[in-house]
Image (cartoon, helix red, strand yellow):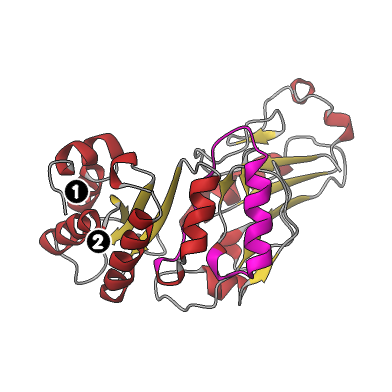
Amino acid sequence: MRIIRVFPRRTTATPDDSLAFTTPPPKDLSKIAGIENINEVHISVAFSYDYPKAEQLAESWYKTGLPVNLPVKMGGPAFGVPGGDFVPGMYLKKGYVITSRGCNNSCWFCSAPKREGGLRELPITKGHNVLDDNLLACSENHIRAVFAMLKQQSEKPIFTGGLEAKILQPWHVDLLREVKTRRFYCAYDTKDDYEPLVRAGKLLREGGITQKSQTARCYVLIGYSGDTFEKAEKRLRDSWQAGFLPFAMLYRNEQGEVLPDWAKFQRLWARPHITYSKLKEVNF
């Protein structure tokens, strides 16, 4: 099936093939290769605050003079519908891969358990940038199969989806080292995350993954209700002390709103080379 995919915004993960768009359709539809063989148009929405733009795009694609009865459908994570098996290159750029969905945790800020439900393993497809909600919570057989796949890829693995520090084990560290992981992320979202982060940092050092390599990184949630710049900076620096290069993740409400001062603060802690230069003299 040939599907045009339309996205309200472009990110580093947006597909870049000839049937992926972030704009209204071209005036001359003949410029779309194989337009006569298109089966559907999908408007893919990742964030609820992109609804208005997504609806505008859906309307513009519906009114283009596309073949009669050609469906224009809206969907995506923002609609709260569980995802199916992962199809490489369809809604994420080639190289990205999802091997499991859902999570058995119930973090207040995370939509994955609400949308996907409990953890479920998917058929493993090829890719090097793993976006699973909670890969380390999968069965050992599944995890080892994922790493076996990663070992066959030409690019070093990245775990953008994150790895839960609380359940990190020495054999996980061995696998991360053996596949020559480029980078992975743990998380420091609540105060209960800190002690597991310290423990994970110790396991990583013992397993040969040093802080100097910048392989181990940490998402640090900032800017939520009750947070302050002082508290946020302390969490960022404490992540470094635990053995991780911090990366500030700015909290957004359902409307996608953020305060300008928080956005400015986040930018200071979201550029790894700048963050590392500020922190590299601070050792444990």
Q: In the picture shown, does residue 88 fall above or below 45?
A: above
Name the spot of residue 213 as percent of width and height, x first. Answer: 34, 40
Magenta stretch holds residue 141: yes
Q: Quadrant of residue 32?
A: top right
Q: Split into 4 quadrants, where in the image is the C terminus?
A: bottom left
Q: Which residue is nearer to you in this view: 166 or 275?
A: 166
Q: In this view of the protein, can residue 16 be seen by the observer?
A: yes
Q: Which residue is nearer to you in this view: 150 or 72?
A: 150
Name the spot of residue 265 as percent of width and height, x first. Answer: 19, 48
Q: Which residue is drawn at the image coordinates 69% and 56% (left, top)?
A: 145
Name the spot of residue 100 as percent of width and height, x first. Answer: 64, 63
The residue identified by callout 1 is 265
**Which of marks 2 and 1 precedes in the sequence?**
2
Chain part drawn in magenta: 136-165
Q: Quadrant of residue 20?
A: top right
Q: Are marks 1 and 2 in contact (CB under 8 Å)?
A: yes
Q: In the picture shown, does residue 187 fall above or below 94?
A: below
The mark total stands at: 2
In the image, taking residue 109 as reference, residue 283 lies left or right, namely left
Q: Amino acid at mark 1?
A: Phe
Q: Quadrant of residue 250?
A: bottom left
Q: Amino acid at mark 2?
A: Gly
Q: Split into 4 quadrants, where in the image is the N terminus?
A: top right
The residue identified by callout 2 is 223
Q: Which residue is drawn at the image coordinates 29% and 47% (left, top)?
A: 211
In the image, taking residue 116 as reference, residue 183 lies left or right, namely left
Name the spot of residue 221 as percent of width and height, x first. Answer: 31, 61
Magenta stretch holds residue 135: no
Q: In the picture shown, does residue 169 fall above or below 180?
A: below
